[in-house]
Image (tube, helix red, strand yellow):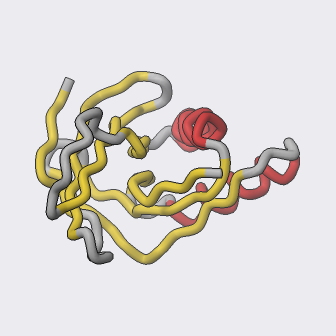
Amino acid sequence: MRDSETFGVEKGHGEEVITWLNEQSKKLGMKLEARLYGYAISTKNFGDFEMFSWIGDVQMARKMIIKASKRFKIKVIEGGYKPKEKVFRMKKFDFAKVKRGEKTIGQIEFVSSRFGSQWEIQDEERH
């Protein structure tokens, strides 16, 4: 089981999307549990997002967030892409794709302190 805190949904849709994700995962017998953690981010290029965390299968999480984007016609952040280099750093990094349905419309680079602070946007790029 994996988890990630760098997934998000367009602001104003958090509760309905999380409820839908959890209902769908139960209905389909998948091991996926999502929950909002009261944190929002604002991007220059893509708007505001409510961030959520999940526990379960990463492939299922990615498929379900894309389905949610299509169903609710919203932008989503699909996170959990780690940098490839294994260099020790004082900060944690995570990369995410911003999607509308199956189409990737941009990328976000997140950074956080090693000691549990919130994720912040370090860089973002439109496609």
x and y, in percent, of residue 47 in the image: 25, 51
* Residue at 40% across, 63% down: 50
Q: Give residue 125's quadrant in the image.
A: top left
Q: Quadrant of residue 33?
A: bottom right
- 37 lies above or below 127: below
What count of labels does the image hold?
0
Residue positioned 16% across, 56% down in the render: 89
Q: Is residue 12 left or right of residue 98?
A: right
Residue 89 in sight in this render: yes
Is residue 71 something that shows in the picture?
no
Please tell me which residue is depicted at 41% across the width and 22% down the height of the picture.
103
| Side (left or right) of 60 relative to 41 | right
Locate residue 12, reporting x and y percent. Answer: 44, 63
User: Residue 62, position in %: x, y?
Assistant: 55, 37
Relative depth, front residue between 93 and 98 = 93
Residue 80 in the figure: left or right of residue 126:
right
The C terminus sits in image quarter: top left
* Residue drawn 50% across the image and 59% down it: 13
Q: Position of residue 102 (x, y in %)?
A: 48, 24
